[in-house]
Image (cartoon, grey):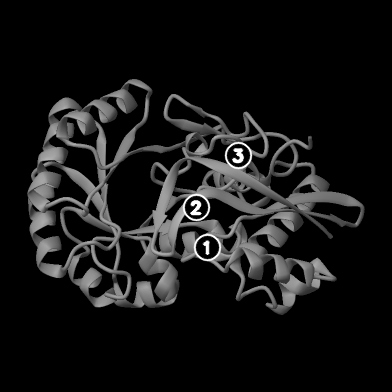
């Protein structure tokens, strides 16, 4: 197995709990299974996965990739496991002469996966303009970042978008910024604006609070909460209406597929997103979404957040949908 480091500059710095990030650094993972090459990507994100150093150490400690996956040795380093497992799945799909999404279980050709546009934290006028641009580009859903402003300001922003874009599916992402009382007031106001769901309204550790909010007119989506508690606890608590799956944080598209299918079996909705990954991991997330029997518009339109990419024109976004690669494996070899 060979690993090659890479660094991709972000077009806008990303503020995280671990600090400001202005580049995405990771590793391409290359291996052979019975003579067939496979390519994976391990791009750790502090706060969601292990550190870059721990990821590299875990990858360099892999002597037998399949044995490492089977033994669970990489379970504590999800980005490293993502890279190795994706490379192995890529090789197996190539050997089977099918696109990765077909290897993951899709029983028919899927050409496109709907995606949402994400609108930042601008004022009401600028937010409405950005949402209108997304509608013009064909996006079926728009997600607004909320929670850093006052609730009244966020309501004004959502009202402006709804007036400008009456037919768009409208979502909000609070990133755990609210307490229970604020979340209840927000959901009541958002119901009048036909908001589909709010992602992570409460801090990730408040599973019971999310359970109390779920099942209403405005759905609840868990992202950080899924990562912190795991799918078993989330399902047992009835804490969400929508499960947000980040394959890099969950340890691979195979693990993310298991989580997504369990959620679907329980009648929940699923959204697949990236952690602002490079082209290899982003394409794999598109394949995962294509392999699922039912998926909401996904958070896969993240190429624009990077100045450069590992490979260009991979799973491009066209008219509000990601184009699913149709060659053997994950992406065509370079």
Residue 249 marker? 1
Q: Nearer the viewer, residue 110 or 19?
A: 19
Residue drawn at the location 70% of the way across and 39% of the way down: 331
On screen, residue 265 versus residue 73, left or right, reads left
Give how far apart the Cα atoms at labels 1 and 3 are: 28 Å
Give how far apart the Cα atoms at labels 2 and 3 are: 28 Å
SS class, disc 1: helix
* Image coordinates for residue 14, horizontal then vertical, percent: 42, 49
Q: Quadrant of the C terminus?
A: top right
Q: Which residue is mark 3?
A: 108
Q: Nearer the viewer, residue 34 or 3?
A: 3
Q: Nearer the viewer, residue 138 or 83?
A: 83
Circle 2 residues within 10 Å: few <14, some 14–19, many ≥20: many
Give how far apart the Cα atoms at labels 1 and 2 are: 8 Å
Q: Nearer the viewer, mark 1 or mark 3?
A: 1
Q: Earlier in the sequence, mark 1 or mark 3?
A: 3
Residue drawn at the location 17% of the way across and 50% of the way down: 149
Q: Quadrant of the N terminus?
A: bottom right
């Amino acid at each position: 197995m060979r690993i090659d480091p890479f660094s991709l500059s972000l077009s806008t710095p990303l503020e995280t709990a671990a600090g400001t990030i202005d580049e995405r650094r990771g590793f391409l993972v290359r291996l052979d299974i019975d003579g067939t090459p496979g390519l994976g990507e391990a791009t750790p994100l502090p706060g969601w996965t292990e550190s870059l150093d721990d990821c590299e150490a875990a990858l360099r400690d892999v002597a037998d990739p399949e044995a490492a996956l089977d033994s669970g040795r990489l379970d504590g380093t999800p980005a490293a496991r993502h890279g190795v497992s994706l490379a192995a799945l890529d090789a197996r799909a190539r050997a089977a002469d099918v696109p990765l999404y077909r290897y993951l279980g899709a029983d028919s050709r899927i050409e496109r996966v709907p995606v949402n546009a994400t609108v930042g934290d601008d004022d009401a006028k600028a937010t409405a303009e950005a949402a209108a641009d997304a509608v013009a580009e064909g996006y079926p859903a728009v997600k607004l970042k909320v929670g850093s402003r006052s609730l009244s300001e966020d309501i004004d922003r959502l009202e402006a978008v709804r007036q400008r874009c009456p037919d768009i599916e409208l979502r909000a992402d609070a990133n755990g910024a609210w307490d229970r009382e604020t979340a209840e007031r927000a959901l009541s106001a958002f119901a009048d604006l036909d908001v589909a769901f709010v992602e992570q309204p409460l801090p990730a550790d408040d599973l019971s609070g999310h359970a109390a909010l779920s099942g209403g007119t405005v759905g609840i989506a868990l992202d950080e909460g899924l990562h912190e508690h795991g799918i078993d606890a989330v399902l047992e608590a009835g804490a969400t209406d929508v499960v947000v799956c980040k394959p890099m944080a969950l340890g691979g598209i195979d693990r993310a597929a298991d989580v997504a299918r369990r959620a679907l079996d329980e009648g929940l909705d699923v959204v697949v997103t990236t952690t602002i990954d490079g082209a290899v991991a982003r394409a794999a997330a598109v394949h995962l979404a294509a392999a699922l029997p039912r998926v909401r518009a996904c958070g896969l339109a993240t190429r624009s957040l990077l100045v450069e990419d590992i490979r260009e024109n991979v799973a491009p976004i066209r008219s509000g949908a990601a184009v699913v690669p149709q060659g053997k494996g994950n992406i065509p070899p370079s």
